[in-house]
Image: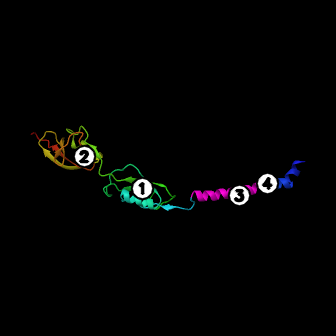
Amino acid sequence: MSLIKFLTSKSFLKQIVLAVVAVFVLCFVLLKWLNTSTNHGDFETVPDLKGKSIDVAQVALEDNNLVMKIQDSANYNPDYPKFSVIEQEPIAGSKVKENRKIYITLNPSGYRKMNIPEGLIDKTFRQVKPTLEALGFKIGKTTYVNNIGKDIVLKLTHKGKALKPGDKLEKTSVIDFQLGNGKRP
């Protein structure tokens, strides 16, 4: 039998038609199975959690069949209550699948405590001020006392208490300065 006769025979054409039908049926069954197993077209809407406490956020996510994952706390934000949600991923209003993890970032209880660095005493106010501001401290009052060094930092205080290197203060704490006025005592 020649190749051309075999390719045009009824049995070969039946096999080709059966193979094509089998592929179509297999694809149809596979697509239907994927639609049902992946909940195709079924979405949950992510609620807005910003400013809410952990408990309220947990309930809101459970009502929407979502899972809460807490990320590490961020820098303190005074615009939000303590231990409330300040960021979420994915954002509110996003359409996600059921049981999707929603990552939230919490507001800590207060500003982080920073160490007072060494070497600030006997330096000029002009050198010390940017160092403290870079650490997040605020500059308070400056008082002058008789000392030969003009604008030399003699003492740092916070709420009347003298500060020494290594003391810890919350970020944004106000530090007052005692400086020399350039006159002999």
Residue 179 location, quadrant = top left
84 with respect to 116 (left or right): right
Q: Secondary structure at mark 1?
A: strand
Q: Residue at x 73, y 55 (%)?
A: 22
Q: Earlier in the sequence, mark 4 or mark 3?
A: 4
* Residue at mark 3: 25
Amino acid on which the number 4 mark rests in the picture: Ile
Q: Secondary structure at mark 3?
A: helix
Residue 18 location, quadrant = bottom right
* Residue at mark 2: 169
* Residue at mark 4: 16
Residue 168 visible in this rendered orientation of the protein: yes
Q: Earlier in the sequence, mark 4 or mark 2?
A: 4
Q: Residue at x 49, y 55 (%)?
A: 100
Tell me residue 168's x, y (percent).
Answer: 25, 43
Residues in magenta, as a range:
16-38
Separation of residues labelled 4 and 2 (CA atoms): 81 Å
Amino acid on which the number 1 mark rests in the picture: Gln
Q: Residue 167: say if magenta.
A: no
Q: Earlier in the sequence, mark 2 or mark 3?
A: 3
Residue count near mark 4 (Cα–Cα under 10 Å), binned few <14, some 14–19, many ≥20: few
Tell me residue 111's x, y (percent).
Answer: 29, 50
Foreground label between 4 and 3: 3
* Residue at mark 1: 88
Q: Secondary structure at mark 2?
A: strand
